Amino acid sequence: MKLGGLFNFAAGATLTLAASTVAVSAQEVLRFGHVYEASTPYHAAMVNAADLLKAKTDGRYTMEVFPASQLGKETALNEALSLGTVDAIYTGVAFLGQSYGPISISDYPFTMRSYDHWKAYVNSDLFAEMAGAYKDISGNTIAAMTYYGARHVTSNKPILQPSDMDGLKIRTPNAAAYQMFPKATGANPTPMAFAEVYLALQQGVVDAQENPLPTIQFKKFYEVQSNINLTGHITNSLAVVVSPVTLSKMGADGPLFLEALVEAASATSDEIVQSEAALVDWFREQGVTVNEVDRKPFMDAVAPLLSGNDVPWDAEVFARLQSIEE
């Protein structure tokens, strides 16, 4: 009886271990990749999304988040998304525009009037139509949009009017949307990898750069630039994009994944807006000159280009965007 009892206990323990092994192996771990540092709110948001996903799917799925280009730079991440080797990513609107041009409109200068205008736009029928067209072409689903911040010019002199930009060698991303503002104001846009910008500013390879205040802080550009000029020329977004391969394999859990991403992204947008308001004073406390700027002359310089032949949208799309009320 004792031997039989021992056998039964051992058999039960083996079955329990086997069941536990099956449960562990049944949990799917998704991979989220992005190019931003682990210290940013964008990364924290997706860590939060991973927790939400696990809770919503009762542990069937969780997600590992890879920051700082660990899974590749932005171009490589977009390619991996299409292949399904990465499940979801952050990517800029300009990258979405490589598949469907009109959706890049929000990354162009002064197409957005404010954060509230941007919020109304990403919840509009216009954006839903463009996201659908992007999905039809790329296969990818835009799960959520995150506010990245208003982009401002940093330099070693005040930039108060368009003529102050004349001849300025300014680093920009390598996309037409980001080069329009410098070109319209007589500056010399100089594309350069994000990781190289600090050293380029420090060594005088470029005179200036442009980014939102939170980015200027976490990349420490204020250490090598004496002036932050509040041009607010682009209202920037990050798209949270999911691979069609992933949604296909997740089946009924796919909508729960999308829900988790939406919830996390929404909270982050509000956090970024709050940080922008506080950062002006913070930069001034660091001894940086923060210049208030009359944006209208800059807007007037750019305006003719927004309705020209070189933009990837038609007049109707632009008119619909401008008609959206905050």
Image (spheres, rainbow, N blue to C red):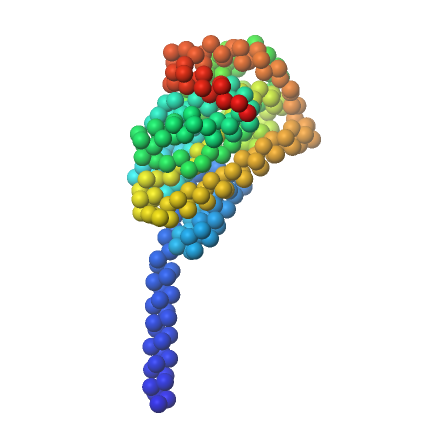
Asked if residue 1 shows in the view, the reply is: yes
Image label count: 0
Q: Nearer the viewer, residue 75 or 47?
A: 47
Residue drawn where x is 43% and y is 22% of the image = 105
Residue toward you, 291 or 256: 256
Q: Nearer the viewer, residue 254 or 4?
A: 254
Specify the quadrant that holds the C terminus.
Answer: top right
Asked whether residue 153 appears in the rendered view, the answer is: no
Q: In this view, does 316 lie above or below 83?
A: above
| Picture residue at 30% right of the left edge, 29% below the top | 137
Q: Is residue 84 above or below residue 178?
A: below
82 to the left or right of 161: left
Q: Using residue 92 as the reference point, say whether residue 140 is left or right of it.
A: left
33 lies left or right of 212 = left
Which quadrant of the structure image shows residue 70? Answer: top left
Could you say where residue 14 lies in the image, as x and y percent from the top left? 34, 73
Is 64 or 171 nearer to us in this picture? Answer: 64
Q: Residue at x 60, y 28 (%)?
A: 222
* Residue 160 image position (x, y, % from top left): 61, 14
For image coordinates 52% across by 29% down, the residue present is 119
Task: Tell me residue 307's x, y (percent).
Answer: 43, 12
Q: In which quarter of the image is residue 214?
A: top right
Measuring from the top left, give residue 23's x and y in whole percent.
Answer: 37, 61
* Relative side of 223 to 186, left or right: right
